[in-house]
Image (tube, rainbow, N blue to C red):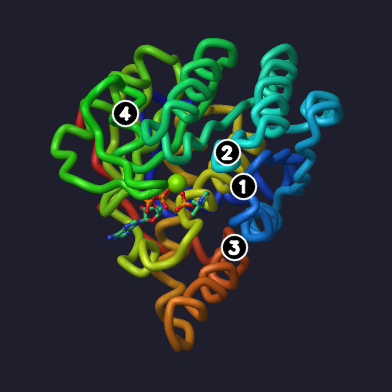
């Protein structure tokens, strides 16, 4: 691995091919709103989804997984127990763990759950919207339910600070995405406004990052290429027949399935990624 991560079409194609070759088992503990979409997104990147989330079985499955996603959208006691148990089991076997801190900062319950998860589990990747990442970085943030509201001009610094304190690669999603490692921060310009008109697109980015983390050796490359590939697929989805947000959401799934290494190889996404620190 060279110091700088390549952002050419060929490099992106290699990452997509590596995920397909590894075909990692990606265990996902997620919310009921997006479960089916996450399973399909995972399969379409060439990984294998399993939504095992019972507190007893979740840590057993984590031991078999190539990566796990802990999405905190569902705050039932049983789900929270399973999140902790699966995260700890994965840490014990060096299975990459992705956290999507849905609604972080909104209620005392969510604050407590995210604090305890960050204390007890080591995360390889944390992906959330600008508000969630800013809150986890310990700064003032406005999250309304699961939506980021307000202005976040300092989100690059917040993502970097959270990466430094947790050791995770942090992906802050929004109009542009920030991908922050401990020593490097990138901005990714890919995606379409339609991604903000459909529920669950942040959760689907989490599933994407888990699939790439399970398939690639280097965590920062996995996060950067996963974020880029997902954004580009979101753009290509606008080329398909559009009848409103519901058809866009189906088109997004089709676009991910069609985003093969061969398609990526023909693209030149170099200007979509800018290293900012
Ligand atoms: N206005 C936008 N333009 C382009 N991409 C967007 C826009 N808003 C959100 N996205 C993309 O949608 C996905 C979900 O991001 P976001 O809406 O921030 O997460 P969440 O759904 O968790 O709130 C990310 O891939 C992000 O880049
Ligand atoms: C609406 C909602 N409520 C609990 S989880 C969830 C889905 C959130 O999805 P995303 O974070 O991708 O917008
Ligand atoms: Mg989200």
15 vs 184: above or below: below
Numbered mark located on residue 260 in the image: 3
Residue 179 located left or right of residue 260: left
Q: Which residue is depicted at the point 41% across and 63% down?
A: 267
SS label for mark 2 = strand
Q: Which residue is mark 2?
A: 71
User: Which of marks 2 and 3 precedes in the sequence?
Assistant: 2
Q: Position of residue 220 (x, y in %)?
A: 45, 30
Q: Which residue is depicted at the point 63% across and 43% down?
A: 30
Q: Which residue is mark 4?
A: 135
Q: CA distance from mark 3 to mark 1?
A: 28 Å
Q: Between 189 and 162, which is closer to the camera in this rendering?
A: 162
* Label 3 Cα neighbours within 10 Å, binned few <14 / some 14-19 / many ≥20: some
Numbered mark located on residue 31 in the image: 1
Mark 1 C-beta to ligand 2 under 8 Å: yes
User: Which of marks 4 and 2 precedes in the sequence?
Assistant: 2
- Mark 3 vs mark 2, foreground winner is 2
Q: Position of residue 126 (x, y in %)?
A: 46, 31
């Amino acid at each position: 691995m060279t110091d700088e991560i390549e952002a050419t079409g060929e490099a992106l194609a290699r990452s997509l091919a590596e995920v397909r070759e590894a075909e990692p088992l990606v265990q996902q503990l997620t919310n009921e709103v997006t479960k089916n979409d996450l399973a399909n997104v995972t399969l379409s990147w060439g990984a294998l989804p399993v939504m095992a989330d019972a507190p007893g079985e979740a840590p057993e499955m984590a031991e078999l997984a190539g990566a796990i996603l802990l999405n905190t959208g569902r705050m039932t006691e049983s789900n929270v127990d399973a999140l902790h148990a699966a995260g700890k089991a994965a840490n014990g076997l060096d299975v990459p763990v992705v956290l999507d801190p849905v609604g972080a900062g909104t209620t005392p319950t969510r604050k407590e759950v995210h604090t305890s998860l960050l204390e007890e589990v080591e995360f390889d990747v944390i992906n959330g919207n600008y508000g969630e990442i800013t809150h986890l970085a310990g700064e003032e943030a406005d999250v309304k339910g699961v939506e980021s509201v307000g202005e976040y001009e300092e989100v690059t610094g917040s993502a970097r600070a959270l990466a430094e304190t947790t050791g995770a690669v942090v992906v802050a999603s929004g109009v542009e995405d920030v991908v922050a490692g401990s020593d490097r921060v990138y901005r990714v310009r890919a995606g379409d406004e339609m991604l903000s008109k459909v529920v669950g697109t942040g959760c689907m980015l989490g599933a994407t990052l888990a699939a790439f983390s399970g398939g690639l050796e280097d965590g920062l490359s996995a996060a950067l290429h996963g974020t880029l590939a997902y954004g580009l697929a979101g753009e290509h989805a606008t080329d398909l027949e559009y009848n409103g947000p519901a058809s866009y959401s189906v088109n997004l799934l089709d676009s991910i399935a069609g985003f093969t290494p061969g398609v990526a190889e023909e693209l030149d996404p170099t200007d979509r990624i800018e290293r900012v620190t």
